[in-house]
Amino acid sequence: MSSPLRNFAILSGMGAVLVLAGAASPDPSFTRNTESAARTCFHIRDVEGYSPAKIGERDGVNLRIKNQDVFQVEFVAPCPEAGTAARVKLTSNSATDFVCTGADATLVAFAESGPTRQCAISGLRKLDKGQVAALPENELP
């Protein structure tokens, strides 16, 4: 006759096998979300151009990314220097140089003369083709 403790050990082992089998099969929604996130992030080195933008009443910039995507950046506080800077660059606030949210980077505006300004980013969104087509010409990066 088998002991209750032995039966428990066998059943526990079978349960662990079932749990592991379930973990081994990919969750399709996770894959889709990961792929979607990959398309809405960009690497800092892939920024090829920028232009000042008005986002409602706030100042921002539009960034052209190497793969021709356009991202719109909104600042935490007014950053008029971003619109008049001789050049801008993004600096990473994270362990990687990938930007997926505003918290991942800071925009640095280099003036021709005067101080350099760091502008904290509050919002970041990828524009679709229709939104890019609707941008005024002076806001196209």
Image (spheres, rainbow, N blue to C red):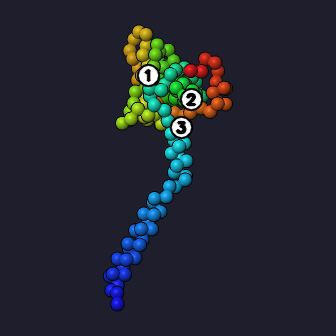
- Furthest-front residue in this view: 1
Q: Residues within 10 Å of mark 1 (few under 14, many from 20)?
A: some
In three-dimensional space, the C-alpha distance between marks 1 and 3, rounded to whole angstroms, equals: 21 Å
Q: Which residue is mark 1?
A: 89
Q: Residues within 10 Å of mark 2 (few under 14, many from 20)?
A: some
Local SS, label 3: helix
Identify the residue at horizontal 39%, vertical 35% (top origin): 96
Question: In front: 130, or 20?
Answer: 20
**The label number, if any, that marks residue 69 in the structure image:** 2
In three-dimensional space, the C-alpha distance between marks 2 and 1, rounded to whole angstroms, equals: 17 Å
Local SS, label 1: strand
Type of residue at label 3? Arg
Count of numbered circles on the image:
3
Q: Which corner quadrant holds the C terminus?
A: top right
Work out whether 137 lies above or below 125.
Answer: above
Q: Which residue is mark 3?
A: 39
Type of residue at label 2? Asp
Local SS, label 2: loop
Question: In front: 114, or 68?
Answer: 68
Mark before the other along the chain sequence, 2 or 3: 3
Quarter of the image where one finds residue 110: top left
